[in-house]
Image (cartoon, rainbow, N blue to C red):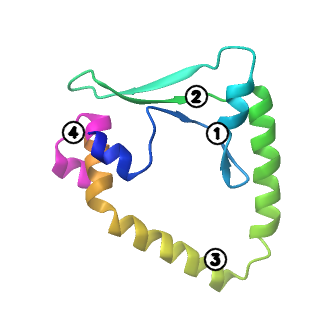
Amino acid sequence: MDDILRHFAIEKVHSGVYCKKNWLKQKQKQKQKQTAILSSINPTTEEVLGAVTLADEKDYDEMMVGARESFLTWRTVPAPARGELVRLIANKLRDEKDALGTLVSLEMGKSKTEGDG
């Protein structure tokens, strides 16, 4: 299991907020209050696979500003170029099918075949 988490650079406690090409991990460490955490548990073994920190209102607002800025840039990219990027993403997902299927099977308590599906 640790191999698959390392493969995707998933930490034991991972930031749950991505904004402006960065995970908001650094800012969450500086907060005075306790950050809420959501754990991912294998339903078959009840083993904790990992966890993500949850966004607070400030994180959410920052993420939404970043999403809006990204949208304003993305909409200026010509449709053929956007389509090419989507194709490249699909190719990468196909390349990672085995590892992603393993991760899905761990998270959902399914067989490897079901996870691959």
Q: CA distance from mark 3 to mark 4?
A: 34 Å
Residue 68 within the segment the image draws in magenta:
no
**Does residue 113 belong to the magenta stretch?**
yes
Q: Nearer the viewer, mark 4 or mark 2?
A: 2
Residue type at mark 3 is Arg
The residue closer to the viewer here, 86 or 38, is 38
- Residue in the picture at 80% in, 30% down: 58
State which tag comes first along the sequence, 3 or 4: 3
**Residue identifier under label 2:** 53
Q: Nearer the viewer, mark 1 or mark 3?
A: 1
Q: Which residue is mark 3?
A: 82
Q: Mark 1 = which residue? A: 17
How many numbered badges does the structure rendering display? Answer: 4
Relative depth, front residue between 110 and 52:
52
Report how far apart the C-alphas of labels 2 and 3 lie in the structure: 31 Å
> x%, y% of residue 88?
49, 75
Q: Position of residue 40 (x, y in %)?
A: 40, 29
Q: CA distance from mark 1 to mark 4?
A: 27 Å
Tell me the magenta residue range: 106-116
| Amino acid type, residue under disc 1 in the picture | Val
- The residue at which mark 4 appears reads as 110
Tell me what residue is drawn at x 50 percent, y 24 percent.
Answer: 38
